[in-house]
């Protein structure tokens, strides 16, 4: 196994060679892959023609799989295309047809186009995401990753001091609200209760590399103790600092690419493609977090 760093200037994103995700991963390779993810935050494997069971098995090398959300009536079990261990990030319904423009699941899924970290709204936030490109769009549909360690490093000393002890409130209500999705209009009171914001620190430190990073996301809607308007402006300013082109790796998908990223160190977003004409079947497994970062 070897690898090549794709943004070598900042040591971000690496392509890994010599791994077959359909096969068992040796203990030695598991340790090396975990090291590479922590060091480069995004790792890419080409030509990995896998099925769901193989993706699940490969993902379990990195921890326990976080089941896909079943919090809402929007994602009824009977409408699911994939098992609960898989997150469906495609533009397809259960008959493998593109979701219509006005379909609520499609609109909910458009939240993936905002800069975010996966499932930062969980009390124990997830760690790695593993995304498999089964079918990819010919035009557009890239995934952009933003190195949040660089974002943190770019802050002035004053800003570093300011963010150090701040606490953010994360919820799907905030990210979907940014797209005009009014959750209280479409969800029951009981469902809304499940979207209650959770608290996360704004700064995280990687326990292996000791590097600090900003923990931001479209799901972050409020700084604890602040006015809403002040929070929104401050969060927007921070995201703008991080999402500078020098700190971004844009992944142009090819069929059977497999990409792993560390949600504790990067934000990401999907880019536009014509989801009414093209098929983009990408499937995600997600590794559950093992600890709560802040008492709720
Ligand atoms: Fe995502």
Image: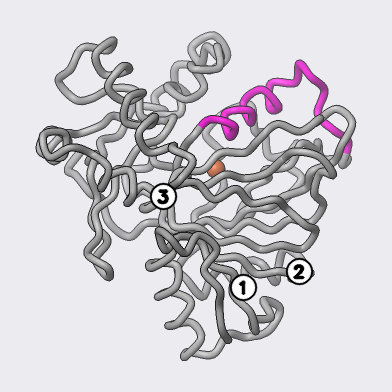
Nearer to us: label 3 or label 2 = 3
**Residue 57: numbered disc:** 1
* Relative side of 2 to 152, left or right: right
**Range drawn in magenta:** 97-114
Ligand 1 quadrant assignment: top right
Q: Secondary structure at mark 1?
A: helix
Question: Is 296 or 146 nearer to us in this picture?
Answer: 146
* Residues at marks 3 and 2, CA–CA distance in whole angstroms: 28 Å
Q: Find out if the beta carbon at label 2 lies less than 8 Å from the nearest ligand 1 atom.
A: no
The crowd level at tag 2 (other Cα within 10 Å; few <14, some 14-19, many 20+) is some
Question: To which residue does mark 3 refer?
Answer: 147
- Quarter containing the N terminus: bottom right
Question: To which residue does mark 2 refer?
Answer: 50
**Residue 110: numbered disc:** none
Q: Find out if the beta carbon at label 1 lies less than 8 Å from the nearest ligand 1 atom.
A: no
Label located before the other in sequence (3 or 2): 2
Percent from the top left, x then y, of residue 117? Answer: 44, 42
**Among all residues in the image, which is located at the extreme front?**
9
Residue at left offset 56%, top offset 73%: 4
Label located before the other in sequence (2 or 1): 2
Q: Secondary structure at mark 3?
A: strand
């Amino acid at each position: 196994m070897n690898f090549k760093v794709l943004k070598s200037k900042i040591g971000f994103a690496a392509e890994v060679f010599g791994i077959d995700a359909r096969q068992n991963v040796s203990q030695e390779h598991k340790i090396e892959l975990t090291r590479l993810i922590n060091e480069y935050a995004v790792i890419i494997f080409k030509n990995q023609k896998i099925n769901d069971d193989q993706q699940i098995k490969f993902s379990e090398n990195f921890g326990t799989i976080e089941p896909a959300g079943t919090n809402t009536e929007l994602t009824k079990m009977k409408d699911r295309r994939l098992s609960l261990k898989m997150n469906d990030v495609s533009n397809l319904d259960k008959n493998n047809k593109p979701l219509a423009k006005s379909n609520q699941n499609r609109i909910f899924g458009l939240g993936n186009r905002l800069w975010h970290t996966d499932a930062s709204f969980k009390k124990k936030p997830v760690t790695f995401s593993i995304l498999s490109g089964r079918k990819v769009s010919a035009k557009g549909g890239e995934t952009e990753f933003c190195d949040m360690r660089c974002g943190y490093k770019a802050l002035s000393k004053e800003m570093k001091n300011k963010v150090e002890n701040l606490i953010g409130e994360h919820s799907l209500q905030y990210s979907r609200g940014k797209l005009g999705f009014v959750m209280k209009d479409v969800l029951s009171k009981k469902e809304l209760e499940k979207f209650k914001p959770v608290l996360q620190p704004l700064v995280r430190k990687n326990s292996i590399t000791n590097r600090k990073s900003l923990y931001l996301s479209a799901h972050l809607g409020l700084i604890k103790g602040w006015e809403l308007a002040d929070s929104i402006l401050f969060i927007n300013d921070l995201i703008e600092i991080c999402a500078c082109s020098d700190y971004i790796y844009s992944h142009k998908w090819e069929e059977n690419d497999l990409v792993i990223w560390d949600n504790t160190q990067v934000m990401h977003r999907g880019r536009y493609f014509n989801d009414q004409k093209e098929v983009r079947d990408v499937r995600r497994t997600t590794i559950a977090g093992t600890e709560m970062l802040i008492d709720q």
